[in-house]
Image (cartoon, coloured by chain):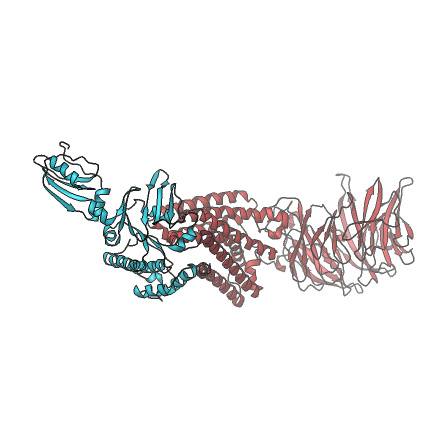
Amino acid sequence: MKALIYKEFRELLAPALTVVLVASVLLLVEYWRGPLVDDEQRVLAGVFFMLGVPLLGLLAGSHTLAHERGRGSEAFQGSFPVSRGAIWAAKLCTGLLMLAVVYLLLYTVAFVTEPEGARAFSQPFPQFGTSMIFLHAATTFFLFCLGFFLSGMRKNPFEANMVALLAGLLLVVLWIFLAADVLPRFFGPQLGILYNTPSFSTPAILATVLGLGLLVASGYGYMASLPLAYSKRLWRTTIAGAILCLAIIPAFFVGVRYLGEPGPEDIGWAEPAEVSPDGEWVMFYDWRGSRGTPDRPDRLWRMRPDGTELKCLARQPVEFAVWLPDSKRVFISWGDRDANFHFLPRTYLEWNWLIDVADGKATSLPALEYVENEAPQFSSQGTYMSYGANLVRVKPELVLLEMQLPQKATVVGWEEDESGIYFSYSKNNRLTLARAALPSGSPLGVAVGQPPEEAQSIKLSPHARWVVWGTRATKPATAVATLENLGSGARLEVAGWPAGRAWSPDEQYVWMWTSGRQMVVVDLAHLRVVKEFGTSDFSGEETLRLCHWSLDGKRVTLATQKVVQDKAESRREEIVEWGPIHLWVTNADGSGLRRIAEIRTSELAFSVIAGWTADGQIIVTVEKRKIISIDPDTGAQTEIFASTVPPENSEAEGRY
Amino acid sequence: MSELAIETSGLTRRFGSLVAVDSVDLQVPKGAVYGYLGLNGAGKTTTIQMLMGFIQPTAGEMSVLGFDPLRQDVAMKRAVSYVPERVQMYDWMRVREMLWFGANIHPFWDQKFAEHLRARFELPGDRRIGQLSRGMQGKLALTMALAPRPVLVVLDDPTAGLDAVVRREFMESIVGILQEAGTTVFFSSHIIDDVERVADWVGILHEGKLIVQEPLEELKSAVKRVVATFPEQAAVIEDGDILQQEGEGRQRAIIWADFDDEKLQKLQAAGASDIKVEDCSLEDIFVAYVRPQPAVAEGRTV
């Protein structure tokens, strides 16, 4: 066996070393001298690598036996007292071992020369990670074995290679379908291939037919032209056929277009900015035209509150982008139902990712069923996420918790120490607030302080100390907002429907705006209303009010805006007039109200006000074109970002 | 214990409608140098490939040194060395590397004997096999076959592709070495001189059938060339042992298997005179066996 392995090793050494040397030299040259090819060519190189290497693995497996037969040394080898099984085992094991060594060396060089070198392997495929590397290697190994045994079944070396080639071509097609369509359904799109070909089937079929036709014609044409001793030259046919396959596949099948690393000069509309919970980052979307076209994907950006460190975090049409409580990661979710974008699956799933804000690296979460217009909520330390009726453990294993919540249950909050989850559900027409332990999901019973039968819209404070709900009475038509302490059961009732609320970071105060166009400030420590605002306290007829707490909990920003809605013509309420947004600042207890800015816009206030930064500035988006920072003391405005690219269809929409 | 190194019974191999080997009953005695003669395409290589267990017979049984080649091929090859036709070794290996390869793959490899053979054949140890001449490659193959000191050596047309001088040298080398070792040799060839020079047993395969199998000297003593003159137009002699007869007019030349006095009297009774009985070369015998009977002038039969 030693002699057989030595012989196989020596025969494979030269081609394996050639592959490693060529790739290593390219990577090292790139590492020292910069990119050798442009980004689009790099994508094609990556696709070639992804598709070509498994196919070459298949050919190598086939050639291991076919070459022995082709050159006529099989009979000589068979003259020794070793079984055919031993000969095949030596070939197969040595081949697989060499393949593993090639992979190991290539990836070692690639990762040692990171980041430049690794780009050749990672850049074309978003979130191309360890799992993809192993999958790719496993595919190559499998195809090597398949080629080997296919070849072993044919005595004629030419037939063996042709059979392997045809099988290889079909397998590459299968691989594409697997990588693009099947695998993402189970493992998420990090195992998929980037596409922008809207219709995959037609070019795939055409390419398959064309490729097979050319392959068979050229192969058998070549064979017919050979003299009797053709066998020694058959490897040329093999190689020619392989190149033919590989040349066709990237061009016809994949149609990848690398969009390049986006820069600030590309940003069209800047969608609403949002400040991270720690006030250290600002994130916003941009888009330049209608959603979902491959050339103009929506993107997600982040920057510091002073406008520096601008970086693109995601280049997908994002449904939601939500800060995690640690401010280090952003949850994004995207679906392809309205995108016709680069992933083929047409399932109504949301692809979910956690993106590291610092370096932009993405980690996949399980794909979840589409939940319309519902953003996820995170527990206080970001360990768990609720998303509709799905509960996901975010770290460390990224496991979907199979917690059986009652049907149509809504997660309303978390225990502060993440030991339990609160959710509300309706049972026998009665809204119930319940609790379950985490991560087991075992029920902890009905929460203290049950809302009355007619209660609706139950909400929990961030630290799970308070619960608020609304009740309506029809005769007379009144609404009451009730605050209850979950520990003591102490209650406070306030007139009006609890339309919105903002808890101070220490939960000493809550600001609630009610349906009566009133805003009340409740001192939770003493459970009393300390301030009420009415229309007369503001500039006039503002109908919309929002408030944001500063991070130190000492001040509040109030945004008011007059919005005129009309539902006369279309039953749905249409906004017919956006008034200017007035920005106010008060103390935590509502005292010291003063107006610091007027922002003229055609947007609603909640699309404009981003929040407070760590250094006490207020971030505001203006007309989707500018992001400004406002000093709450002086009202001075500083522009931290401005788009210079007119959106493609901005004139048609009349917004630019 | 059988005195036969190779024994087959009704050995048959079909490839589709083609019968490559047709009910061959081989009997190769131990210690013999058995020449397996046949035209190109007669089925010699197919027979050998079946004997070495590379292909399966369609019908029949076979035994090589008491082993079943299909089920006991590994055990068999420990005692049997085989050199395929136009042997192709690994061109990239050096001669000494190839001997190392053999030593590490064959349990009975005799390295001293291998070195002795290498020196005798003047094979350069550091030369790559691809750089050796065909003759040298043949000698290296023979070295690889003999170094394990086999009981039986099977050579498939070992001189194919060699020029006359190298062929003669090669065959004499085989004979010399194998006579020293007392090894049984079974070799196929279509070159009759080679067989006649070294073989002591001959088998002639024609169109898949084994038509002759006997010791060479017995064959040569049994088959005679008879030239006779008849008083008038020569009659066509009818006898099952006549392999070939040709001639025009009154004279006729006949190659006759198992020629004896009874057949001589039959000729004389037919009026033949001036009868000459000559020994045949193996080539004459082979041609007589495998060439179709040429037409003879029509006339009376005897």
The chain coloured cyan in the image: B
The location of residue A50, given as percent across then percent down, is: 53, 54
Q: Nearer the viewer, residue A317 or B10?
A: B10
Farthest-out residue, left: B231
Q: Colour of chain A?
A: red
The location of residue A602, given as percent across then percent down, is: 73, 51
Question: Residue visible at 40% across and 60% down?
Answer: B108
Question: Residue visible at 75% across and 39% down?
Answer: A570
Q: Visible in this render: residue A125?
A: no
Question: Residue visible at 50% across and 62% down?
Answer: A36
In the image, residue A297 above or below residue A111: above
Farthest-out residue, bottom: A32
Q: Nearer the viewer, residue A401 or A246?
A: A401
Q: Visible in this render: residue B115?
A: yes
The location of residue A463, given as percent across then percent down, is: 82, 57
In the image, residue B281 above or below residue A34: above
Q: Nearer the viewer, residue A367 or A97?
A: A97
> For the image shown, how many numbered marks are present on the structure?
0
Question: Residue visible at 48% across and 44% down?
Answer: A208
Q: Nearer the viewer, residue B162 or A288?
A: B162
The location of residue B285, given as percent across then percent down, is: 21, 45
Q: Is residue A444 left or right of residue A367?
A: right
Farthest-out residue, front: B1
Farthest-out residue, top: B300
Q: Is residue B20 left or right of residue A493?
A: left
Q: Is residue A354 left or right of residue B155?
A: right
